[in-house]
Amino acid sequence: METRSVADVAGAWVDPDFESSLIERCRKNWNVPVGEISNYVLSTFIRQRIALALVIPEAKRRLAAGFVDDTELYDDELANAVAESTDA
């Protein structure tokens, strides 16, 4: 399980000049070890291209293990986020 957080790779959180549910979700999970965040948040970080060197390997580990935590917005959200990130 990955014990580093996004903050360990991307640096300290810097508040933007606006609020949104996306900002709130990222802020709340910024300092949480990647191995402890939900698949939904992991998908969010991937789609936002945040700390990809850290979050992509964790996502691939979870997908290979068949780990499902029922947090994804739709079936295969994490798999789709990973696939889309590698298409770019």
Image: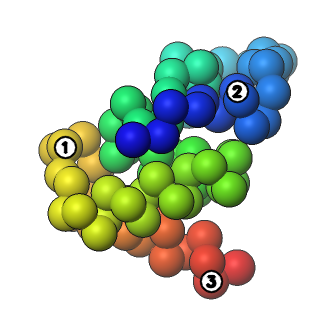
Residue pictured at 41% horizontal, 71% vertical: 80
Q: In the shown orientation, is residue 55 left or right of residue 37?
A: right
Judging depth in this view, the residue of 48 and 5 nearest the camera is: 5
Q: Which residue is mark 2?
A: 7
Name the residue rendered at 16%, 44% in the picture: 70
- Most foreground residue, 48 or 31: 31
> Residue 25: percent from the left, percent from the top?
51, 26
Asked if labels 2 and 3 touch by Cβ distance under 8 angstroms, the answer is: no
Find the distance from the CA under tag 1 to the CA under tag 3: 25 Å
Q: Which residue is mark 1?
A: 69
Category of crowding for the residue at label 1, using alpha-carbon neighbours closer than 10 angstroms: few (below 14), some (14–19), many (at least 20): few
Please state which amino acid type lies under the numbered disc 2. Answer: Ala
Mark 1 and mark 3 lie on one chain; the one further toward the N terminus is 1
Q: Mark 2: give few (<14), some (14-19) or many (20+) Cα within 10 Å.
A: some
Q: Secondary structure at mark 1?
A: loop
The answer to which of marks 1 and 2 sits earlier in the sequence is 2
Q: CA distance from mark 3 to mark 2?
A: 25 Å
Which residue is tagged 3? 87
- Name the quadrant of the C terminus: bottom right
Tell me the SS state at disc 2: helix
Name the spot of residue 56 as percent of width and height, x first. 55, 59
The type of residue carrying mark 1 is Asp
Q: CA distance from mark 1 to mark 2?
A: 23 Å
> From what the image shows, is residue 39 above or below residue 11?
below
Sequence-wise, the earlier of marks 3 and 2 is 2
Report whether 88 appears left or right of 63. Answer: right
Residue name at image x 60 percent, y 70 percent: 85
Q: Is residue 41 visible?
A: no
Q: Quadrant of residue 5?
A: top right
Amino acid type, residue under disc 3 in the picture: Asp
- Assess whether mark 2 and mark 1 are in contact (beta carbons under 8 angstroms): no
